[in-house]
Image: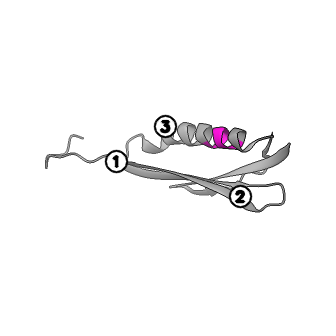
């Protein structure tokens, strides 16, 4: 098992993970990244027509080993605003 840290980057800036999680496989790291992106995205897209969220994964030495990005965009085809 290794400790991984999941740093979040969103419209509020960067949030550094100081605690991390002990995970044993790349698949478990990827699953955790997906969980984080889904949780954060629900808040990020509320009331916004666009948004982007990234998670940078660091290993226990502090080296970035992975990045995941999720972008959201909603466009209306008519000229009227539906606000």
Outermost residue, bottom side = 63
Which is more foreground, mark 1 or mark 2?
Answer: 2
Q: What's the residue at 50%, 55% (across, down)?
A: 11
The quarter of the displayed image where residue 30 is located: top right
Q: Tell me where residue 83 appears, x and y as whole percent.
A: 24, 41
Mark linked to residue 49 = 1
**Which residue matches tag 2?**
65
Q: Earlier in the sequence, mark 2 or mark 3?
A: 3
Q: What is the magenta segment's predominant secondary structure?
A: helix
Is disc 2 placed on a helix, strand or loop?
strand
> How packed is label 2: few (under 14 Cα within 10 Å), some, or many (20 or more)?
few
Residue range highlighted in magenta: 29-33
Q: Which numbered marker is on residue 60?
A: none
Q: Pick whichever of labels 1 and 2 is earlier in the sequence.
A: 1
Could you tell me if the residues under marks 1 and 2 are in contact, i.e. CB atoms within 8 Å?
Answer: no
- Residue at image location 56% in from the left, 37% down from the top: 39
How many residues crowd mark 1 within 10 Å: few (<14), some (14–19), many (20+)? few
For the rendered model, the colour scheme is one colour
Is label 3 in a helix, a strand or a loop?
helix
Q: Quadrant of the N terminus?
A: top right
Q: Is residue 8 magenta?
A: no
Quickly name the residue at label 3: 42
Position in image of residue 37 (x %, y %): 56, 43
Left or right of 57: which side holds 22? right
Of 36 and 14, nearer the camera is 36
- Report the Cα–Cα distance between label 1 and label 3: 13 Å
| Residue 18 at x, y percent in the picture | 78, 51
* Earlier residue among tags 1 and 3: 3
Q: CA distance from mark 1 to mark 2?
A: 30 Å
Query: Could you tell me which residue is drawn at 14 percent across and 46 percent down?
Result: 78
Which one is closest to the eye, mark 2 or mark 3? 2
């Amino acid at each position: 098992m290794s400790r991984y840290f999941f740093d979040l980057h969103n419209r509020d800036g960067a949030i550094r993970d100081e605690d991390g999680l002990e995970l044993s496989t790349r698949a478990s790291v990827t699953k955790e990244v997906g969980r984080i992106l889904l949780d954060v995205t629900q808040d990020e897209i509320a009331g916004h027509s666009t948004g982007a969220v990234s998670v940078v994964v660091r290993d226990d030495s502090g080296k970035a080993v992975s990045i995941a990005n999720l972008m959201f965009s909603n466009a209306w085809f008519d000229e009227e605003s539906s606000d």
